[in-house]
Image (cartoon, helix red, strand yellow):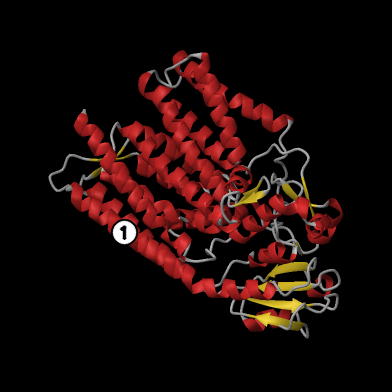
Amino acid sequence: MQTHIVATKYFVLIFLALFAVTQFPLYWVQYPDIVDFPNHLARLHILIHLSDSEALQQYYTLRQLKIGTNLAMEVLVPLLAKGMSLMLALKVFASLAMLSLTSGAVVLGRVINGKVSYLSLGVLFFAQNAMFQLGLLNYLFGLGLAFWLLAAWIYARNNSRLFHWVAFSAGCILLYLCHLSAFGVYAVCVLSYEVGCAQSKFGLKSRSALKALLLSMTQFIPVVVLHILISVSAGTYTPAPMEHSLLQIIYIWLKYKLILLIISPSICVSGYVMGQAIFGVFLVFALYVGFREGLLKLNASVKWMASALAICIFLLPFAGFGSRFLDVRLIPALGLILWSGLEVGQHRKFKPNVMLGVIAVIVVLMSLNAAREWLLRDAEYRQVRAVLQKIPEGSKVATIILNKPVGPDSISAHAGAYSVIDRSTLLSNMFVWPFQPFWVAYREEYVPLVTRARLDDLATDLPKYENIKEIYNYVLIFGGKDIDRNQYAQNAETVFSSKSLRLIRTNLAQPAKDSW
């Protein structure tokens, strides 16, 4: 028993040390290249400072009803910001999200397999996954909590006391408030796990199997009631028009899902092409060799959960319920579920210390790759923010993303959000629409104006510059090459240009407070 406790403590220390390595890039640069990071920072700035800023009050407001999903950041970051800068508070929240995610996968593996091994440290390969790079931080934080709650459910599922139901119902509500997709992953995994247990013990058609399945579903009732009665989480993107026959639509759907299947390992490990190519291929090769040589095997219950998530990925569209990446965001969840179910087979070739060394080296290399990618972009973020600080306070800024390939080292198209923080601007791509659950929203009178520059609706075409320049003071043009940006806004006054964007001043703009 004493030996087991010592081994567990040693494992925890190694895990925390390697986790710290994965977080090194986040604190090494001033501006992490997380796509939604500027928007998150600006939205939280509004949340904290709205009552003190008349300029912000002109464009933004707080919701009266504050119950909905996607709220983990809204609650925790302002609390953290009381003792540190808002930028650092958001970085800490990002670290907490990844700690929740990776540690939750380790605990889930411990409950499923009955033990931990150095193989469990492989969950840290997922610390730089593409959803993290996109900035889906609320989802990743909630997904980590979902893994913790799933591990607790598996461990205590035979307890039928009232307190058991109350505790897990409260856990479901917490997941829902963090992110709807995180709650969905938990619900799918619980139901598929129960189906797998029923199949192995009673058979799916038995009364006992049906009873166990229904009892597991009762914990979801409070969430369903909450969502229907008082939640502000609603709305869907308008489906992009498809002028195809049914067979062509099916072909396009299958082709898209096949591509997702091929790139799934890469999505799990990195958000950059180089990292995806190197570490994604390595991950597939290592797992292939491990199963072929009998070094690895997969827990049976995990097969049920992974299969259910795979079906969800196949059936879900790319966009819906007021969000994008509905199917893609489940891929890291699927990868972590599969990894948590890996067991080391009894094989004489297996050497734990060698596995530990290999995992540690890969984690270090993946972190160095992320740090390299972020350092390449940090200087441009600094330049862009310095330029945006010269915009007159209270200006209206539109962000236009061209339908052109971006450069390999382009910065986030949400970099304009720094103008909200520094100059209290109205920004067209803040993603605080009335149907979204964030506590901050555009004021109703400005929604029609912002909608004219809206780019998150798949059914809308690219706004024309002739229309944009009549209502906005400045236009940020992202995407394509410099010649593409010139063609979009011909004969427009350019006040700043970089490899990722061009800042245009319209006729409505007032002189800047300083020279450009």
Q: Position of residue 313 (x, y in %)?
A: 52, 46
Q: Can residue 479 be spotted in the picture?
A: no
Q: Give the class, few, some or many, for how many residues have Cα within 10 Å of label 1's Cα (few <14, many ≥20).
A: some
Residue picked out by circle 1: 362
Residue 195 sits above or below residue 254 on the image: above
When asked about the image quadrant of residue 299, the answer is top left
**Mark 1 element type:** helix
Please identify the quadrant where the C terminus is shown.
bottom right
Dot 1 amino acid type: Ile
Q: Position of residue 196 (x, y in %)?
A: 41, 28
User: Which residue is depicted at the point 41% across and 34% down?
Assistant: 304
Please identify the quadrant where the N terminus is shown.
top left
Q: Nearer the viewer, residue 250 or 37?
A: 37
Residue 390 sits above or below residue 17 on the image: below
Residue 487 sits above or below residue 256 on the image: below
Q: Can residue 465 be spotted in the picture?
A: yes
Q: Residue furthest bottom?
A: 491
